[in-house]
Amino acid sequence: MGELLLLLKKFFGYSSFRPLQAEVIQRIINKKDSLVLMPTGGGKSICYQLPAIYLPGTAIVISPLIALMKDQVEALVANGIPAAALNSMLPEEERQRIRQHCIQGQIKLLYISPEKIMSELDWLLSRMEISLIAIDEAHCVSHWGHDFRPEYTQLAILKERFPNVPMVALTATADKVTRADILEQLKLKEPETFISSFDRPNLSLTVHRGLNKKDKITAIVNFIRAHKNQSGIIYCMKRADTESVAQALSTFNIKAVAYHAGLSPKAREEAQNDFINDRTEVVCATVAFGMGIDKSNVRWVIHFNMPGSIENYYQEIGRAGRDGVNSDTLLFYSIGDMILLRRFAEESGQMDINLEKLNRMQRYCETDVCRRRILLNYFGEESKDDCGNCDVCRNPPQRFEGSILIQKALSGILRTNESVGMHMLIEILRGSGRSDVMRLGYNNLKTYGAGADLPYKVWREYLYQMLHLGYIEIDYVHDRNLKVTPLGKKVLFGEITAELAVYTEPEVAKRPERKKREKKERKPKATRAPRQLQPSELDDALLEALKQLRKRIAEREKMPAYIIFSDAALKDMVDLKPLTLDEFREVKGVGDAKLEKYGNVFIALIRYILKIPTENEE
C-alpha cells in the first residue's frame, strides 16, 4: 500500500487510512465488487476516490443530488484532482466539453445521477475507459431503505454492460434487510461487505419530550445561544414550521433561513448557498435539506419533530460533526408527532414495515437505555457499554440485575424456534390460555408461564430494552419474528450478566415553570491594565484568526470555507502551530495542492499571532 499512502498524503493530506479504507481500496484495485457501510464522516469517499486516482481511466460515481455532486467536485478540484459532474443544469456546450474530456481520459472522476447515466450509457460510457463504478447513497436502491428511489433500480444494467469493471456500493445507513436487498438489486458479483463502526462518539444525543411549540422555541433559543457562532440545522416535519421557526428565531436576533420544496428554486438555492458559505448560521428545513451538501463544520442538529425511522434520524444527525469535532444533537418528541407520522405510515405503500420502524423510533425517544447503544444495536453493531454522552447516561435511571428475566425471554424465543413475535412471546411467558397459544402447543413449552408475575405492559417494556441493548432483533422479512443475537446468547448461557432499567409508569409531561427575572443593578466597569493572554486564550485567538483568514479566502475564491480547510484542520494548526512549510505539511488535510496554494499565508498569520518574526525579519 506504499504508493497508495503517498497518494493519500499528496492529494488528501492524510498519512494513514481509517478503519477498513485500505481493505476496500485493495479490493477495488483487484477488480472485485464491494458493499461499504461507513457512517457519515467516516471516510467513504476516499474508498473510491483514491483508487480512481491510482487506476487508469475514469471512475463513474453515481450520486442522487446535483448539489452533492457539486460539493464533491469542488473539493476534489481544490485538492488538485481532475473531476467533473454531468447533469441537466449545465449548458449543452459544457456537457459536451466534459464528455470529450472523459473520452480523452482527462477526468479521473465523473459524477452523474442515476437518471442521467441511462441516457449516457450507449454513447458516452461505451467510449470511455472506466476504472470503477461507485454507487453512493446505495440505500436508495432498496424498498426496505428509508429513501427508496425507483431510478436506482435501473442500475443493475451497469453490471451486465461492464462485467469486468469493479463496482462499489456505499451508504451510511442500512440495516440487515436493506443490505441484503442492495446486493440483490445491484447484481454485484461475489461481493464482500465491509461494515465500519456506526459509532459517532463526537455526537452528543439528547431528547426532550412533551414540549409545546412555544416551549420548543425557548429551548432552541437557549441552545443556539450556548452554541454561539456555530452552524446548525433545525429539521421540521412541515413546511410551515420551517418558516414559523425561522421567523420566531429572528425575533431573538438569530439569523435563520427557511428551506423547503414549496419555495422557488432561486430561494432554495440562495438559502443553501448562504448556509454553505457561512453567511447564515441556522437553516430551518424539511428533511431533504443537507443530503446534498458536504459541509463539514455543522456543529449541531435539532429535530423540531420526531423522524419516522431510526435510519432517517441517524442520517440526519450525521450531518453534524462530519469533521470529527464534538457536536450536539437535540430531538423534540411529542404524541402529536406520533399521530401524524402514523398516518403517513398507514398511507404509504409499505404500511407494516413503516409502522414497525416508526415504533422503533418512538421507543428510542421514550427509552431509559443509553441512546447510542440503541443506534448501534439497531444497525447490528454489538455494544456492551453505555456511552456517557447522551441524556440517559448523564441522568441514569435506577437499574436492576436482569439476567434471569432476560434468560426467560430468550429461552422462550429459542424454544419456539424463533418463530414468534413480541406479542405471542409475552402471551407464552405470562401463561396465557388463549386459543392460538394452545393450538400451537406453546402451553407445553418449559417457559410457558415462566413470567406470569409481570403484567403484559411491563414485559413489553423489558423486551424493548432487550431489543435496544442488542440481545434480540426483529426479522422484518419473516413476519417480524424475534431472533436471539450472539450477544443475547452470552447472557442466556451465563457468560455475561445484564442490567435493565426499572419499569416506571410514564408521566404526563408538564410545562416548565417560568422564573421571573430579577432586575440587577448595573455596576460600572472597572478599568483594568492590559494582561498577557494565557495559553488557552492564545489558542482561542489563533483559531478565530485562522477562521477569519479562511473566510476571506473563501469569499475571494467564491468557495465554501470548509473546502479551503475543515474546522478539524484549523484545530490541528492550533495544536501544531506550524512555522515552516514542512511543518505545515503535517497538518491533517493538507495535501500538495493546498500546501502550495495556502501554506505561506496561513504560516504568516500563525507567526503574527504568536509574535514570531518571519525569516526575512529575523
Image (tube, rainbow, N blue to C red):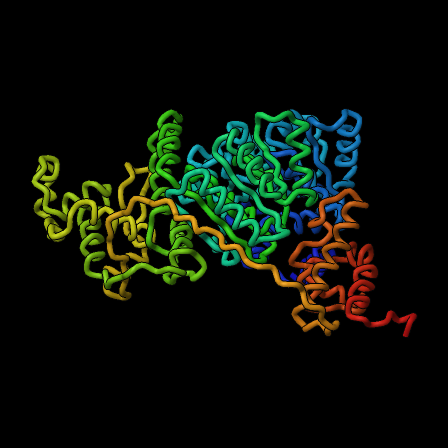
- Seen from the viewer's position, the closer of residues 145 and 239 is 239
Spot the residue most to the front: 521
Residue 301 x, y percent position in the rendering? 53, 46
Quadrant for residue 368, please give it. bottom left
Residue 527 x %, y %: 71, 68
Coordinates of residue 318 in the picture (x, y in percent): 53, 48
Q: Residue furthest right?
A: 616
Q: Is there any visible trace of residue 135 in the rendered image?
A: no
Q: Residue at x 22, y 56 (%)?
A: 406
Q: Is residue 404 above or below residue 351?
A: below
Q: Quadrant of residue 144?
A: top left
Is 424 in front, or is 56? 424
How many numbered discs sit on the rendered protein? Answer: 0
Q: Residue at x 50, y 48 (%)?
A: 37
Q: Which image quarter is the C terminus in? A: bottom right
Q: Nearer the viewer, residue 99 or 250?
A: 250
Whether 146 is drawn above or below 228: the answer is: above
Vertical relation: 319 (above or below) 2: above
Taking the image as shown, residue 612 lies to the left or right of residue 50, namely right
Taking the image as drawn, is residue 412 in sight? yes
Q: Give the side of residue 429 with respect to residue 560, left or right.
A: left
- 426 or 453: nearer the viewer: 453
Q: Position of residue 422 (x, y in %)?
A: 23, 43
Of the 4 image quadrants, the one containing the N terminus is bottom right
Name the residue located 80 percent from the left edge and 56 percent from the top edge: 598
Left or right, residue 58 beside residue 218 = right
